[in-house]
Image: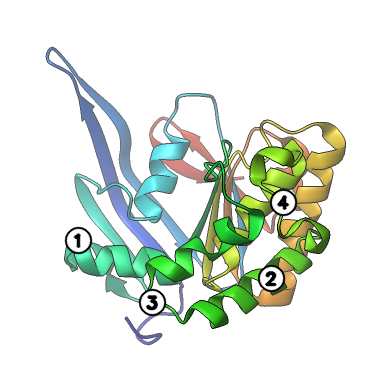
Amino acid sequence: MDNSGSEYLLSLQNISKNFYSKTSQIQILDQACLDISKGETIAVVGASGIGKSTLLNIIGTLDKPDSGTVSFYGKDIFTNTDEALAHFRNHKIGFVFQFHYLLQGFTALENVMMPGLIAHKNKKTIENSAINMLERVGLSSRTHFRVEDLSGGEQQRVALARALVMKPELLLADEPTGNLDIVNSQSVHQLIKDLNKDLGMTVIVVTHNNALAQMMDKKVTLIDKKIVSA
């Protein structure tokens, strides 16, 4: 996947998604469209249960739309094999969730190294990258602490460092400060913006936090299964 053929990093065109039970069909997205430029920061807001996380999962190729296209630099990413999509996620996208999903019993450094080890990167190279990223998120003194010995705010910073260790072009964050207090939330908000500026990465954040939404370049809302610009 090269960087030619489109002015947009990502383009979602006519995305529809349904969920099915034994007795019913629930439509989550209906012909939703969104263009995302390289380096842009976007907040996705809307009522609970309206489909924000589903949208983020489709952008991150964790879920497939029922119809429509998701293009990365003009190329439909869902034409790729599952193996190619896994490689794309590992190299191009960083994920941060409300629940950090860190590996208990492992150190902050070991957790941050994990994406690089999965990608079969040189161990020393990925270790140096992980140490550098932990320093950037303000955790150089916690490198060898087990994650269960860190505070909630520190654990979320480890999760952010892990998401960024492969230097992805796109960071996807789903309620990244939903479980943090005000002080830690503000710190993570500013860190995300600083890293966006320093690394030039594109950021898409699903959030109910108005302060975080206001910090983004653009805010879009999910209304009636559509994406509406604020």
Name which of mark 1 and mark 4 comes first in the sequence. 1
Name which of mark 3 and mark 2 comes first in the sequence. 3
- The amino acid pointed to by label 1 is Asp
- The amino acid pointed to by label 2 is Ile
The answer to the question of whether label 1 and label 3 lie on touching residues, with beta carbons closer than 8 A, is: no
Per the image, label 1 sits on a secondary structure element best described as helix
Q: Quadrant of the N terminus?
A: bottom left
Q: Estimate the x, y position of residue 146 in percent, counting from the top left.
A: 66, 47
Circle 1 or circle 2, nearest the eye: 2
Observer-nearest residue: 63 or 123?
Answer: 123
Name which of mark 2 and mark 4 comes first in the sequence. 2
Per the image, label 3 sits on a secondary structure element best described as loop
Observer-nearest residue: 215 or 81?
Answer: 81
Name which of mark 3 and mark 4 comes first in the sequence. 3
The numbered dot on residue 145 is 4
**In this rendering, does residue 101 appear at all?**
yes
Question: At 52% across and 72% down in the image, what residue appears?
Answer: 166
Question: At 78% across and 58% down in the image, what residue appears?
Answer: 139
Q: CA distance from mark 2 to mark 4?
A: 13 Å
The numbered dot on residue 131 is 2
Q: Estimate the x, y position of residue 184 in percent, counting from the top left.
A: 82, 41
